[in-house]
Image: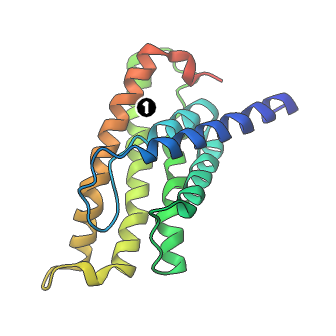
Amino acid sequence: MNQRTKVITLVETAILAALAIVLNMFTPFHLWPNGGSVTLTMVPIAILAFRRGVIPGITAGLITGLILLVLPGAFYAHPIQVILDYPLAFALLGFSGWLSIKNTTKQSSQIIRVVIGLFSGGILRLVSHFLSGVIFFADYAPKGQSVYVYSLVYNASYILPEIIISIIVVIVLLYAAPKLFRP
């Protein structure tokens, strides 16, 4: 990778991380009392991951998570919980680009790769939030309910809809603006 490409990749990473943060602020569904919401935060991180690869995607997710951590509304229970719920959870979204769509010309193949990639990145994020819930938020589980079931249901109730909405938005963008996905 030449110096010019590195600089362009860094600029794109910063811009798409900033867009992810802005999109995180627009939360149409505030249904969860203990954190979590359905947003479009995954979309710019996934676009970057598909456009430039996993490392820039992870970097944008990490930046997004770190900045969300210092914005109003962030919740701190323990340093490890902070890592699991913010930088790690959002960095894992960068794995969406593990299936490259750059060298795939068939749109049906690109769509399949987008669905699998976004689902994978979203599930990795879910795992991070799930672990945080099991380890640090066990007290929130209703009496008699498994903390594992509680954490899985609670976190999946907002992450799975976000994955589905993000997949739809990215597929629409893939059709409407395919150049977004090409470096």
As drawn, 149 above or below 99: below
Q: Residue furthest left?
A: 144
| Way the structure is coloured | rainbow
Point 52% across, 46% down: residue: 21
Residue 19, percent across and down? 55, 38
Quarter of the picture holding the N terminus: top right
Q: Could you tell me if residue 109 is visible in this image? A: no
Q: Secondary structure at mark 1?
A: helix
Point 35% across, 73% down: residue: 133
Point 27% across, 48% down: residue: 29
Displayed quadrant of residue 134: bottom left
Point 43% across, 56% down: residue: 124
Displayed quadrant of residue 183: top right
As drawn, 37 above or below 6: below
The foreground one among 11 and 109 is 11
Q: Residue furthest front?
A: 72
Residue 18, percent across and down? 59, 42
Q: Could you tell me if residue 8 is visible in this image? A: yes
As drawn, 63 above or below 69: above
**How packed is label 1: few (under 14 Cα within 10 Å), some, or many (20 or more)?**
many
The foreground one among 58 and 142 is 142
As drawn, 81 above or below 143: above
Q: Which residue is mark 1?
A: 113
Residue 35, percent across and down? 34, 64
Q: Is residue 122 left or right of residue 180?
A: left
Numbered circles on residues, count: 1
Residue type (three-letter) at the residue carrying disc 1: Arg
Q: Is residue 10 left or right of residue 93?
A: right
Residue 68, percent across and down? 53, 57
Q: Is residue 36 left or right of residue 101?
A: left
